[in-house]
Image: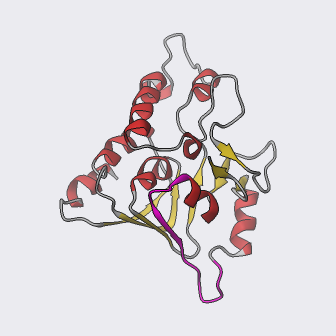
Amino acid sequence: MTACVEGRFAPTTTELVLTSRGGSADQAMRIAERFEGRRLTMTVKGECNSSCANYFLPLAGRLIVEPGAVIVIHGGIDPSLISRTQASANGMVEGGADLEAIAERQNVFMTRNRINPGWLLYREAGSTAVERLDGAWADFDARTKAWLVEETMAKSCLPDTVVEYRTDRRGEWLSESRRSALRRQNVARSNTVVCN
């Protein structure tokens, strides 16, 4: 993705078409810095998950979610994650990533771009409560690994973004069979969850 952005993103770019399962938080923020202040139209085709959702979508001026496309979040790098994944005495995890340094970078990025902590499912160390979220998830249980962002959550968490979930000819954004497949993958729906 970095190579794609470096090779194709230009000062005249006004729209991004996104299909990404996510990736490194640190690398995603490096890419996203190129999008800051541009108010780009971002169209999700297929999926925009994890770091794609966390760091790219909050920078959009307009967000279009194509029929059948999904936005899936599982949270950013927060004190709760760091406390759960202390992999070695020096705070480094597999691959040499320094989670505390990435968390600090994320906090600066969030503040600079006025990203609601609820969008990143931000939790303090030892807490399961997500800051600045209200409402109830659907299909949530102990096996849940990630959350499907529905239109209500996207609009509340990204208030400076025009959000449009497009529907197919039957008037559906996401078919019941696709929702069932996501449930089998332990992905819960955002349901009535909103950022406050």
Residue 43: horizontal and vertical position, in percent? 43, 68
Foreground: 100 or 36?
36
Residue appearing at x 50%, y 27% in the figure: 94
Q: Is residue 163 magenta?
A: yes
The answer to whether residue 7 is seen in the rendering is yes
Q: Is residue 32 left or right of residue 138?
A: left
Foreground: 173 or 4?
173
The answer to whether residue 150 is seen in the rendering is no
Question: How many marks do you count on the picture?
Answer: 0
Q: Outermost residue toward the left? A: 11
Q: Main secondary structure of the magenta part?
A: loop
Judge whether 71 appears above or below 112 on screen.
below
Q: Is residue 110 left or right of residue 89?
A: left
Residue 99: horizontal and vertical position, in percent? 48, 25
Judge whether 148 appears above or below 107 on screen.
below
Foreground: 68 or 130?
130
Residue 70: horizontal and vertical position, in percent? 57, 64
Residue appearing at x 47%, y 28% in the figure: 103
Magenta stretch? 157-172
Where is residue 124, by image quadrant?
top right
Q: Is residue 55 magenta?
A: no
Q: How is the model colour-coded?
A: secondary structure
Residue 163: horizontal and vertical position, in percent? 50, 66
Where is residue 175, by image quadrant?
bottom right
Q: Outermost residue toward the bottom? A: 169
Q: Outermost residue toward the top? A: 89
Residue appearing at x 74%, y 50% in the figure: 135
Foreground: 122 or 87?
122
Residue appearing at x 43%, y 43% in the figure: 114
